[in-house]
């Protein structure tokens, strides 16, 4: 079974600085999808960035970028120029569409606090 | 685009009662998902619909749980004979197009079973 591990339960960063959140996953498959979701306090989950495993180029979305290391099964999220609004729980998630499966497997999350 | 909506937002019930939650996905989205999230954990997959067909169910979805999407639009999740262990946030999500596009989540329904 696929698993997702986020080894940092909590992190903090100063406003305007850069922070990297770690995520590793376990799968024997070669074609899959990886996601980072953001869940602000008492608000709904938002998709931050996605990566297709067959693409070597790392995905970027404005201040958010990933470092996808397929051989190491690592998918870290880098947030540049951190803003107070980035304070949230961040979840790494994995999807392997075998046999039509649409299940997202989530890690336990990293609580990120951006300090002024 | 009004986003995914869920009702009610909060539900408090007594053990043994039945509860039903509703999810309205983004209008053009043909895929709909239910997840359960307990405190301090990531969401856990419950079930998935493509249009009105329920195509995937987790083993977490015991026989007390049932989900429907009768016309391929809104969906309901019913829990019968609720137990204290059912207390959680129930999240609905929807998506459109091919696998891997990413899901849009609703605000969730928080269930408390006394």
Image (cartoon, coloured by chain):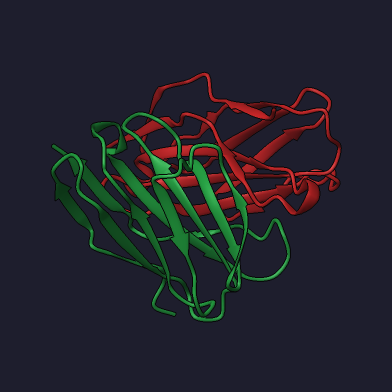
- Chain that is coloured red in the picture: A
Q: Is residue A53 left or right of residue B17?
A: right
In the image, residue B8 sits, relative to residue A36, either above or below, namely below
Which residue does the image show at 13% across and 43% down from the upper left?
B14
Q: Return the x and y of residue B103 as percentages of the image width and height.
A: 55, 58
> What tint does the image give chain B?
green
Question: A48 or B107, which lies in front?
Answer: B107
Quarter of the image where one finds residue B6: bottom left
Q: Residue furthest top?
A: A7
Q: Quadrant of residue B113?
A: top left
Q: Residue at x 24, y 52 (%)?
A: B18
B112 sits to left or right of B51 = left
Quadrant where the C terminus of chain A sits is: top left
The residue at the point 54 percent across, 25 percent down is A6
* Along the viewing direction, whichever of B35 and A11 lies nearer the viewer: B35
Quarter placement of the N terminus of chain A = top right
- Residue A33: percent from the left, percent from the top? 72, 46
Q: Eyeballing the image, is B21 above or below A115?
A: below
Q: Position of residue A32 (x, y in %)?
A: 77, 44
């Amino acid at each position: 079974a696929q698993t997702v591990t986020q080894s940092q339960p909590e992190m903090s960063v100063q406003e305007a600085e850069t922070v990297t959140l770690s995520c590793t996953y376990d799968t024997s498959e070669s074609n899959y999808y990886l996601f980072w979701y953001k869940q602000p306090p008492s608000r709904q989950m938002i998709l931050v960035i996605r990566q297709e495993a067959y693409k070597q180029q790392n995905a970027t979305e404005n201040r958010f970028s990933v470092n996808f290391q397929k051989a190491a099964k690592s998918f870290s999220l880098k947030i540049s120029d951190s803003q107070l609004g980035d304070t949230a729980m961040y979840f790494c998630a994995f999807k392997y569409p075998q046999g039509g499966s649409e299940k997202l497997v989530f890690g336990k999350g990293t609580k990120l606090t951006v300090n002024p | 685009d009004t986003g995914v909506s869920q009702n009610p937002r909060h539900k408090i019930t007594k053990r043994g009662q039945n509860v039903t939650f509703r999810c309205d996905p983004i209008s053009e989205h043909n895929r709909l998902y239910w997840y359960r999230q307990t405190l301090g954990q990531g969401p856990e997959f419950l079930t998935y619909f493509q249009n009105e067909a329920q195509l995937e169910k987790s083993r977490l979805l015991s026989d007390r749980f049932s989900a429907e999407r009768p016309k391929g639009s809104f969906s309901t999740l019913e829990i019968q004979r609720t137990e204290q262990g059912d207390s959680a946030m129930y999240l609905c999500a929807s998506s459109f197009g091919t696998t891997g596009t990413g899901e849009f989540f609703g605000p969730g329904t928080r269930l408390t079973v006394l």
